[in-house]
Amino acid sequence: MIGVAFFLFAFAEKRNHARILSEVNLQFTNDENLYLTEEAVNKLLIQNEIRVKSIGKETLDLNRVESLLESHEMVENAEVFLSVDGKMGAKITQRKPLGRVMASAPFYLDRQGFKMPLSEYYSARVPVLTGVREEHLKEVFPLVDYITKDEFLTRHVTELQRRRDGKYEISLRKLDFVLVFGEVKDIELKFKNFKAFYQKALKDKKLDAYQKVDLQFGDQVVCTKK
């Protein structure tokens, strides 16, 4: 009985080592493959001589595959695994853009604060950043990140403009005034003041009465009428 058990174990182990990977299953953790296609992933693997459907599962270097996937300019994170039935799976988290920088060669600012290239497959609906260069990304990131995480601001903000003095102005959807934000500091306080002003002006039906709303003066919101 013991001999039979060892034989069956050795036989199964040999078959498992010899098994050829039959399929690649890709999963996108954000439920969308907007910036990266399955064809692009397969092309990346083939270019690096990893032909998953014709390689023994015990000879596949999972760490190398993960590193290759994460080297793609649209991938934030990748987790690669093997199933017992000879299939390779990969959970891919794509990079997420927060703003589109309108430079001579446009690019995105991603949710980690880094430069991200535009995609040939999809154009993200994010605020436009003008007057911003690559060296300004660290400066503007906290402001864009805060806006992205706030439902009210996400709904209204369409553009952030960096002036030459390093201060920012914000354009709002369906509103005819310029929102002067100033330097990237006291973000929460400034937007709290703006929301209070907005609700009051909306109630009084005076949102169209102003050409400029300035948030640079502490607890005050300074408005310039048309």
Image: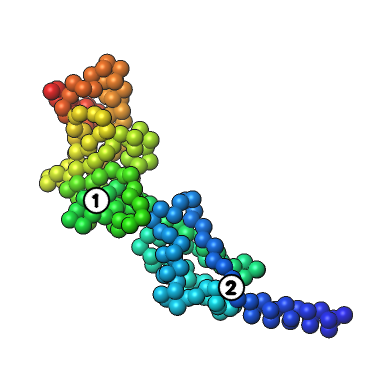
Decide if residue 145 is on the left or right side of residue 178.
Answer: right
* Residue type at numbered disc 1: Val
Measured as percent of width and height from the top left, residue 111 is found at 36, 51
Measured as percent of width and height from the top left, residue 113 is found at 32, 53
Q: In the displayed structure, would residue 139 be above or below residue 77?
A: above
27 and 5: which is toward the camera: 27
Separation of residues labelled 1 and 2 (CA atoms)? 42 Å
Mark carried by residue 21: 2
Decide if residue 46 is on the left or right side of residue 139.
Answer: right
* Residue type at numbered disc 2: Leu
Give me the residue at 62% from left, 66% from top.
83
| Mark found first going from the N terminus, 1 or 2 | 2
Measured as percent of width and height from the top left, residue 199 is found at 31, 22
Residue 155 occupies quadrant = top left
Mark carried by residue 196: none
Give me the residue at 24% from left, 50% from top.
101
34 and 159: which is toward the camera: 34
